[in-house]
Image: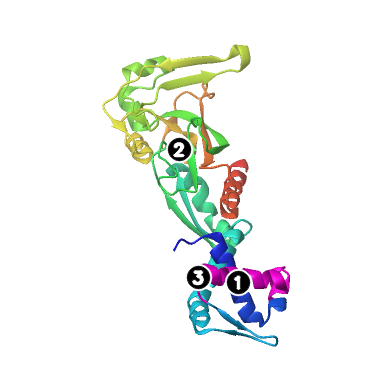
Amino acid sequence: MSIDGRLLAGMSVLAAVVESGSFSKAGEVLGMSASGVSRAVSRLEERLGVRLLDRTTRSLHLTGEGARLYEHAVPHLEGIEEAANVVSGAAVSVRGALRVSLNPLFARYVLAPALPRLQALYPDLMLTMVQFPGSGDLVAEGVDVAVRFGPQPASTMTSRKLLENRVLTVAAPSYLERRGRPRKPAELVKHDCLQYIDPQRGKPFEWIFVRGKGRAKEQLTVATSGSLTMTDADAMVQACVAGAGVAQVLALSVEHLVADGTLVELFPDWPGETFPLHIVRPSRRLPPASVEAFMAFCIELCAT
């Protein structure tokens, strides 16, 4: 027997009759007339081919078949009601499981220090943080929200830019002592440059330098090369700190190292190259409150 809306509706009416004790009281609960309730029960009996209620002018009693049906059906009806309440509550209440895919730099330097505040704001939120490639399929991976660096391709996803982070060209003092300090970007063709793979293209990023604005804007692309190519930003920073070569990195990951002298920014007079950070979700349709709350929290973090 197929399960359809009419069968479920009839079962709900029967349950209301049993629990209230009469057609008229069940009608008040359901917003129906007493005759409408009676017709709904009769249609259910016709569909099942058994009598469910013994009716008299003064009382209603479940038949044996009706009692067995009620006993087996009520737990499922209650489960459906509970599931509906949970889902509808998720639209207005920040609670339940949320799976987010985070760029590791954002997770480490921006979100992690603020997690206690997120927990205090939303104690019923169960957050799972994972890392997937920037080009990964969010729906296939079961991800509700992602935070990714780089321009986002046109898609059905909702995307919001969180910030623009400066791209710095840096090297360790030990490397500069050994190889000399380049005075302009073009001199990098003579240096060991650590290459980083663009996850969206599968090729190393170009080394771009920008300064000035408007008509005075100047942009330069330098064809760098080196013996080390990486996909791990942290490994690249550590290799740079160790003196393995020159690196182009996001300021977010090395500002503290530049501030304490561990790394040296080589071209502060070329400050215009930036890289965008976006927060995205797979669909524009009716996001749960937890998704909206997490996105708003990240937007606030990046605005400060």
Q: Nearer the viewer, residue 89 or 106?
A: 89
Residue 220 screen position, x and y as percent: 46, 15
Amino acid residing under circle 2? Val
User: Mark 3 and mark 2: span between their CA atoms?
Assistant: 71 Å
Q: Give, as a single range, the part of the protein colored magenta.
A: 26-50
Q: State the residue at coordinates (59%, 62%).
A: 120
Residue 73 screen position, x and y as percent: 50, 74
| Badge 3 or badge 1: first in the primary sequence | 1
Q: Which residue is mark 2?
A: 254
Question: Which quarter of the figure is the N terminus placed in?
Answer: bottom left
Residue 18 screen position, x and y as percent: 61, 80
Residue 259 in view: no
Q: Is residue 124 covered in magenta?
A: no
Q: Which mark is residue 48?
A: 3
Q: Is residue 299 left or right of residue 23?
A: left
Residue 27 screen position, x and y as percent: 71, 73
- Determine whether the residue tagged by mark 2 lies in a helix, strand or loop: helix
Q: Which residue is mark 1?
A: 42
